Image (cartoon, helix red, strand yellow):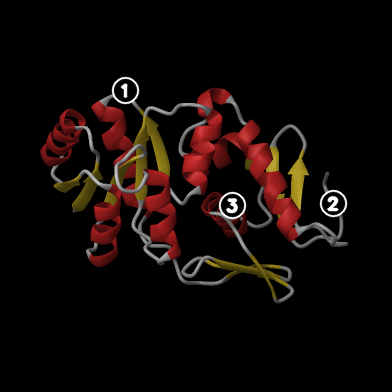
Amino acid sequence: MNILIVEDDESVARFLKQAVSEAGYAPMVVADGSVALQQATHQRFDLILLDVMLPGMDGLAVCRALREKGVDTPILIITARDTIEDKIEGLDSGADDYVVKPFLVGELLARMRAILRRGVPQSTVLQVGDLTLDPATRRAARAGKTIHLSATEFTLLNYLMRNKGKVLTRSMILQHVWEYDFEGNDNVLEVYVSYLRGKIDRGRTNPLIHTVRGVGYRIENSEANAD
Protein backbone atom coordinates (compact mmCIF):
# COMPACT_ATOMS: atom_id res chain seq x y z
CA MET A 1 0.00 0.00 0.00
CA ASN A 2 1.22 3.50 -0.86
CA ILE A 3 1.44 5.97 2.01
CA LEU A 4 2.02 9.71 1.54
CA ILE A 5 3.91 11.23 4.48
CA VAL A 6 3.60 15.02 4.71
CA GLU A 7 6.09 16.28 7.31
CA ASP A 8 8.56 19.19 7.18
CA ASP A 9 10.63 18.13 10.20
CA GLU A 10 13.38 16.00 8.67
CA SER A 11 13.97 13.85 11.75
CA VAL A 12 10.24 13.12 12.18
CA ALA A 13 9.90 12.43 8.47
CA ARG A 14 12.79 9.93 8.58
CA PHE A 15 11.26 8.27 11.63
CA LEU A 16 7.85 7.96 9.96
CA LYS A 17 9.34 6.71 6.72
CA GLN A 18 11.28 3.99 8.53
CA ALA A 19 8.29 2.93 10.63
CA VAL A 20 6.00 2.78 7.61
CA SER A 21 8.58 0.90 5.53
CA GLU A 22 9.25 -1.67 8.24
CA ALA A 23 5.49 -2.25 8.51
CA GLY A 24 5.44 -3.26 4.84
CA TYR A 25 4.04 -0.09 3.28
CA ALA A 26 5.55 2.00 0.47
CA PRO A 27 6.12 5.57 1.69
CA MET A 28 6.56 8.82 -0.21
CA VAL A 29 7.70 11.85 1.78
CA VAL A 30 6.99 15.51 0.98
CA ALA A 31 7.66 18.51 3.19
CA ASP A 32 5.40 21.18 1.71
CA GLY A 33 1.61 21.45 1.95
CA SER A 34 1.13 22.74 -1.59
CA VAL A 35 3.24 19.90 -2.98
CA ALA A 36 1.28 17.40 -0.90
CA LEU A 37 -2.00 18.72 -2.32
CA GLN A 38 -0.68 18.33 -5.85
CA GLN A 39 0.66 14.83 -5.23
CA ALA A 40 -2.50 13.59 -3.51
CA THR A 41 -4.70 15.06 -6.23
CA HIS A 42 -2.87 13.47 -9.15
CA GLN A 43 -1.65 10.21 -7.60
CA ARG A 44 -3.63 7.56 -5.76
CA PHE A 45 -2.50 6.80 -2.20
CA ASP A 46 -4.01 4.36 0.27
CA LEU A 47 -3.42 6.68 3.23
CA ILE A 48 -1.98 10.12 3.98
CA LEU A 49 -0.07 10.92 7.18
CA LEU A 50 -0.44 14.69 7.44
CA ASP A 51 1.31 17.17 9.72
CA VAL A 52 -0.54 20.41 10.49
CA MET A 53 2.23 23.01 10.63
CA LEU A 54 3.64 22.99 7.10
CA PRO A 55 5.23 25.50 4.73
CA GLY A 56 3.31 26.49 1.62
CA MET A 57 -0.08 25.38 2.96
CA ASP A 58 -1.00 24.12 6.41
CA GLY A 59 -2.25 20.59 6.90
CA LEU A 60 -5.84 21.48 7.70
CA ALA A 61 -6.08 23.56 4.53
CA VAL A 62 -4.63 20.65 2.55
CA CYS A 63 -7.20 18.32 4.10
CA ARG A 64 -10.12 20.60 3.30
CA ALA A 65 -8.88 21.21 -0.25
CA LEU A 66 -8.58 17.48 -0.93
CA ARG A 67 -12.12 16.82 0.27
CA GLU A 68 -13.46 19.71 -1.79
CA LYS A 69 -11.77 18.17 -4.85
CA GLY A 70 -13.48 14.87 -4.14
CA VAL A 71 -10.31 13.05 -3.06
CA ASP A 72 -11.46 10.39 -0.57
CA THR A 73 -8.03 9.07 0.43
CA PRO A 74 -8.02 8.40 4.20
CA ILE A 75 -6.12 11.09 6.13
CA LEU A 76 -4.45 10.64 9.51
CA ILE A 77 -3.38 13.95 11.05
CA ILE A 78 -0.20 13.94 13.12
CA THR A 79 0.40 17.05 15.22
CA ALA A 80 1.53 18.43 18.56
CA ARG A 81 -1.79 20.23 19.01
CA ASP A 82 -3.64 18.28 21.68
CA THR A 83 -6.74 20.18 22.84
CA ILE A 84 -10.26 18.90 22.25
CA GLU A 85 -10.89 21.93 20.04
CA ASP A 86 -7.83 21.08 17.92
CA LYS A 87 -9.00 17.50 17.52
CA ILE A 88 -12.49 18.58 16.50
CA GLU A 89 -11.08 21.08 14.00
CA GLY A 90 -8.80 18.45 12.51
CA LEU A 91 -11.52 15.84 12.17
CA ASP A 92 -13.99 18.42 10.92
CA SER A 93 -11.59 19.45 8.18
CA GLY A 94 -12.06 16.00 6.65
CA ALA A 95 -9.47 13.88 8.45
CA ASP A 96 -10.27 10.30 9.43
CA ASP A 97 -8.22 10.22 12.63
CA TYR A 98 -5.89 12.36 14.74
CA VAL A 99 -2.66 11.39 16.53
CA VAL A 100 -0.88 13.71 18.95
CA LYS A 101 2.91 13.95 19.11
CA PRO A 102 4.76 12.36 20.76
CA PHE A 103 3.23 8.98 20.02
CA LEU A 104 4.23 5.32 20.11
CA VAL A 105 4.93 3.63 16.79
CA GLY A 106 2.61 0.79 17.76
CA GLU A 107 -0.29 3.19 18.28
CA LEU A 108 0.34 4.93 14.96
CA LEU A 109 0.46 1.66 13.03
CA ALA A 110 -2.68 0.40 14.80
CA ARG A 111 -4.56 3.55 13.82
CA MET A 112 -3.31 3.18 10.24
CA ARG A 113 -4.53 -0.41 10.10
CA ALA A 114 -7.90 0.58 11.56
CA ILE A 115 -8.40 3.27 8.91
CA LEU A 116 -7.31 0.98 6.08
CA ARG A 117 -9.72 -1.74 7.26
CA ARG A 118 -12.67 0.56 6.69
CA GLY A 119 -12.26 0.32 2.93
CA VAL A 120 -14.39 2.13 0.37
CA PRO A 121 -17.89 3.08 1.50
CA GLN A 122 -20.74 1.11 0.01
CA SER A 123 -22.80 2.86 -2.64
CA THR A 124 -26.23 1.77 -1.34
CA VAL A 125 -28.29 4.83 -0.44
CA LEU A 126 -29.39 4.74 3.20
CA GLN A 127 -32.87 5.90 4.17
CA VAL A 128 -34.73 6.58 7.41
CA GLY A 129 -38.15 8.08 6.81
CA ASP A 130 -37.70 11.01 4.40
CA LEU A 131 -33.97 11.28 5.24
CA THR A 132 -31.51 9.85 2.71
CA LEU A 133 -27.74 9.52 2.73
CA ASP A 134 -25.55 8.37 -0.15
CA PRO A 135 -22.25 7.08 1.32
CA ALA A 136 -20.55 7.16 -2.08
CA THR A 137 -21.19 10.87 -2.70
CA ARG A 138 -21.66 11.88 0.96
CA ARG A 139 -24.87 13.65 -0.02
CA ALA A 140 -27.66 13.90 2.53
CA ALA A 141 -31.20 15.19 2.06
CA ARG A 142 -34.45 15.31 3.96
CA ALA A 143 -37.72 15.62 2.10
CA GLY A 144 -35.65 16.36 -0.99
CA LYS A 145 -33.81 19.29 0.61
CA THR A 146 -30.02 18.96 0.60
CA ILE A 147 -28.28 18.87 3.98
CA HIS A 148 -24.65 19.98 4.07
CA LEU A 149 -22.56 17.85 6.44
CA SER A 150 -19.03 18.19 7.74
CA ALA A 151 -16.81 15.10 7.52
CA THR A 152 -17.45 14.17 11.13
CA GLU A 153 -21.20 14.79 10.87
CA PHE A 154 -21.29 12.52 7.82
CA THR A 155 -19.45 9.71 9.62
CA LEU A 156 -21.74 9.97 12.64
CA LEU A 157 -24.93 10.06 10.58
CA ASN A 158 -23.70 7.21 8.38
CA TYR A 159 -23.11 5.05 11.45
CA LEU A 160 -26.52 5.87 12.94
CA MET A 161 -28.36 5.20 9.67
CA ARG A 162 -26.57 1.90 9.05
CA ASN A 163 -27.93 0.85 12.44
CA LYS A 164 -31.39 2.42 12.20
CA GLY A 165 -33.72 1.39 14.97
CA LYS A 166 -30.84 0.13 17.10
CA VAL A 167 -29.67 1.76 20.31
CA LEU A 168 -25.99 2.69 19.98
CA THR A 169 -24.16 3.38 23.21
CA ARG A 170 -21.95 6.43 23.59
CA SER A 171 -18.85 4.26 23.78
CA MET A 172 -19.83 2.40 20.60
CA ILE A 173 -20.26 5.66 18.71
CA LEU A 174 -17.03 7.16 20.02
CA GLN A 175 -15.07 4.06 19.09
CA HIS A 176 -16.57 3.85 15.61
CA VAL A 177 -16.60 7.53 14.63
CA TRP A 178 -13.44 8.72 16.36
CA GLU A 179 -11.76 5.38 17.23
CA TYR A 180 -10.83 6.76 20.63
CA ASP A 181 -12.81 8.22 23.51
CA PHE A 182 -11.09 11.59 24.04
CA GLU A 183 -9.79 10.28 27.36
CA GLY A 184 -13.27 9.35 28.50
CA ASN A 185 -14.80 12.75 27.68
CA ASP A 186 -17.89 12.28 25.49
CA ASN A 187 -18.88 15.97 25.36
CA VAL A 188 -17.73 16.05 21.76
CA LEU A 189 -20.36 13.43 20.93
CA GLU A 190 -23.10 15.55 22.48
CA VAL A 191 -21.90 18.52 20.44
CA TYR A 192 -22.04 16.63 17.15
CA VAL A 193 -25.42 15.06 17.89
CA SER A 194 -26.67 18.60 18.52
CA TYR A 195 -25.21 19.70 15.18
CA LEU A 196 -26.99 16.86 13.37
CA ARG A 197 -30.28 17.55 15.08
CA GLY A 198 -30.06 21.18 14.07
CA LYS A 199 -29.62 20.19 10.43
CA ILE A 200 -31.98 17.21 10.30
CA ASP A 201 -34.71 17.62 12.91
CA ARG A 202 -35.06 21.34 13.61
CA GLY A 203 -38.54 22.55 12.73
CA ARG A 204 -39.78 18.99 12.06
CA THR A 205 -42.79 17.43 13.78
CA ASN A 206 -41.24 13.97 13.53
CA PRO A 207 -37.61 14.08 14.74
CA LEU A 208 -35.51 11.10 13.68
CA ILE A 209 -32.59 11.23 16.14
CA HIS A 210 -33.58 10.07 19.60
CA THR A 211 -31.77 10.03 22.92
CA VAL A 212 -31.96 6.88 25.01
CA ARG A 213 -31.27 8.35 28.40
CA GLY A 214 -28.24 6.98 30.18
CA VAL A 215 -27.33 4.79 27.21
CA GLY A 216 -26.85 6.53 23.88
CA TYR A 217 -28.76 7.29 20.68
CA ARG A 218 -30.82 5.72 17.94
CA ILE A 219 -32.21 6.94 14.63
CA GLU A 220 -35.61 5.79 13.43
CA ASN A 221 -38.76 7.02 11.72
CA SER A 222 -41.09 7.35 14.68
CA GLU A 223 -43.61 9.99 15.68
CA ALA A 224 -42.72 9.38 19.33
CA ASN A 225 -39.58 11.17 20.50
CA ALA A 226 -37.63 9.12 23.07
CA ASP A 227 -36.10 12.25 24.58
Q: Which numbered dot is residue 153?
A: 3
The residue under label 2 is 225
Question: Could you tell me which residue is drawn at 23 percent across and 59 percent down?
Answer: 39
Amino acid on which disc 3 is placed: Glu
Q: Quadrant of residue 161?
A: bottom right
**Disc count in the image?**
3
Residue closest to the eye, 149 or 115: 149
Alpha carbon separation for disc pair 1 and 2: 44 Å
The residue under label 1 is 102
Mark 1 vs 2, N-terminal side: 1
Instruction: Kindly indicate whether the residue at mark 3 contacts the one at mark 2 (C-beta within 8 angstroms).
Output: no
Alpha carbon separation for disc pair 2 and 3: 21 Å
Residue closest to the eye, 164 or 46: 46
* 195 sits left or right of 111 in the view: right
Q: Residue furthest bottom?
A: 144
Q: Is residue 133 above or below residue 179?
A: below
* 47 sits left or right of 96 in the view: left
Mark 2 vs 3, N-terminal side: 3
Q: Which numbered dot is residue 13?
A: none
Q: x, y percentage for residue 38?
A: 26, 60
The C terminus lies in quadrant: top right
Alpha carbon separation for disc pair 3 and 1: 28 Å
Q: x, y percentage for residue 171?
A: 57, 34
Amino acid on which disc 1 is placed: Pro
Q: x, y percentage for residue 46?
A: 26, 55
Instruction: Kindly indicate whether the residue at mark 2 contacts the one at mark 1 (C-beta within 8 angstroms).
Output: no
Question: Could you tell me which residue is drawn at 15 percent across and 38 percent down?
Answer: 17
Amino acid on which disc 2 is placed: Asn
**Mark 1 or 2, which is nearer the eye?**
1
Q: Quadrant of residue 144?
A: bottom right
